[in-house]
Amino acid sequence: MLTSIRTEGEKIEIVNQLLLPHTTEYLEINTIEEAHEAIKSMKIRGAPAIASLAALTFAASLSKALASLDRPSFLSSPEALEKHVTSILDYLYTARPTAVNLGAATRRISRTLQSSKDAGKDAVTIARDLVAVARLVSDEDYARNKKMSENGSLWLSAFHNLQAGEHLNVLTVCNTGSLATSGYGTALGVITYLHETQRLGRAYFTQTAPYHQGSRLTALELQTLQIPSTMICDTMVGSLFQHRTIHAVAVGADRIAQNGDTANKIGTYNTAVLAARHNIPFIVVAPISTVDLDIKDGSQIPIEHRPSTEACVVRGALYPPRFDSDGRRELAQVMFTPPGLDSDEENVYNPSFDVTPAELITAIVTEKGVAVRREGENVFDLCGVV
Ligand code: MRU
């Protein structure tokens, strides 16, 4: 299985996703600043994975402070610890604005800080509590992904009244597999689960321009897992629905509002509109921590805009292949727009996410269960589900 993060004691390494699928390079993350930079520059991406990296790096920095002979002054009192922790969490939270998991992780750590402080614990004991809860953010991810994947797979099979020997073809967008999480994946987890239980016909995935999480990462994961799959360009979704039998669209989420409106990778909304036109069920698969009950609807979700250059440049390996002296494929970045187009942010519209209105979503799948939008209703009632 491909993993986005690997740990050994306090050592944290991430696979540099900017170099995949041609080069697998692990980068050591030693400081909060390095974690922030890795998330911002998309060396690691995917809502649950960035929350895990932030939490693990925070845990490691605190753990190192606890172990040091010369204990830093922020461990001298609960108030000093709170000041220190709050500034780190606030800083990590600014790395990427749309994925709520990062905020959910930092809020969870803040809540633990508050309750340990209210319980009258000393700074060192509070710091130990914080290390434990931060590690949980990452540790819990795999099991819940497996659970939501099972939930989604069973729900889709029941939706289609799938009989023994029958199979489902599922389209997905972006990358929501083990590289975007701490393992197994969310929407790609559903596809994997269907495959493992002999219920998948074929997975389809969009290239997901402009960052190509589909063609670079999902393609690699599906290949590694030996799941039958077909890539399409983002512009081909309508044609796919017209010419092939697609039983479902399954996507991940970066933030789900109280009414079910869902922010996910750019292009998700287009796919949802086309799925509705073709009566294809459209499901969102995400952990409960992706639901933001503080936000009433999608209009309040902050949408990250990426630098214009990212929409003007493709990254990949030279073709025909050329190899360096270590036998690795040589990588390149190629600009495919006229020179200067990227020099002004006004010239290029490059939102990283879009919002799919709840009325286009058939079901929201979490580790706890499946929330189905009721016939004739345009919103979900997620308050009772999370
Ligand atoms: O910009 P990215 O690559 O971080 O965007 C990722 C997505 O939109 C995913 O679909 C989403 O985070 C869910 S990951 C399980």
Image (spheres, rainbow, N blue to C red):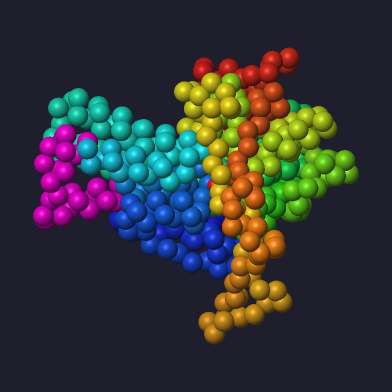
Say left or right for 117 vs 286.
left
Report ligand 1 position as a quadrant.
top right
The residue furthest right is: 243
Q: Is residue 332 magenta?
A: no
Q: Residue 371, can we see it?
A: yes
Considering the image in quadrants, where does the N terminus appear? bottom right
Q: Indicate yes or no whether the magenta region holds residue 81.
A: yes
Q: Residue at x 44, y 55 (%)?
A: 38
**Residue 86: % across, % down:** 28, 38
Query: In the image, which residues are magenta?
Result: 59-82
Give the total number of marks visible in the rendering. Answer: 0
Q: Nearer the viewer, residue 291 or 230?
A: 291
Q: Compare residues 208 and 142 and report the one nearer the observer.
A: 208
Residue at 22% x, 30% y: name it: 116
Residue 322 sits in quarter: bottom right
Q: Main secondary structure of the magenta part?
A: helix
Q: Position of residue 262 (x, y in %)?
A: 60, 31
Q: Position of residue 35 (x, y in %)?
A: 39, 53
Q: Residue furthest top?
A: 376
In-front residue for pair 59/153: 59
Looking at the image, residue 87 lies above or below residue 42: above
Residue at screen point 27% across, 51% down = 61
Coordinates of residue 204 in the picture (x, y in percent): 74, 48
Residue at figure coordinates x 66%, y 36% from the top left: 153
Examine the rendering and report whether any part of residue 135 can be seen.
no
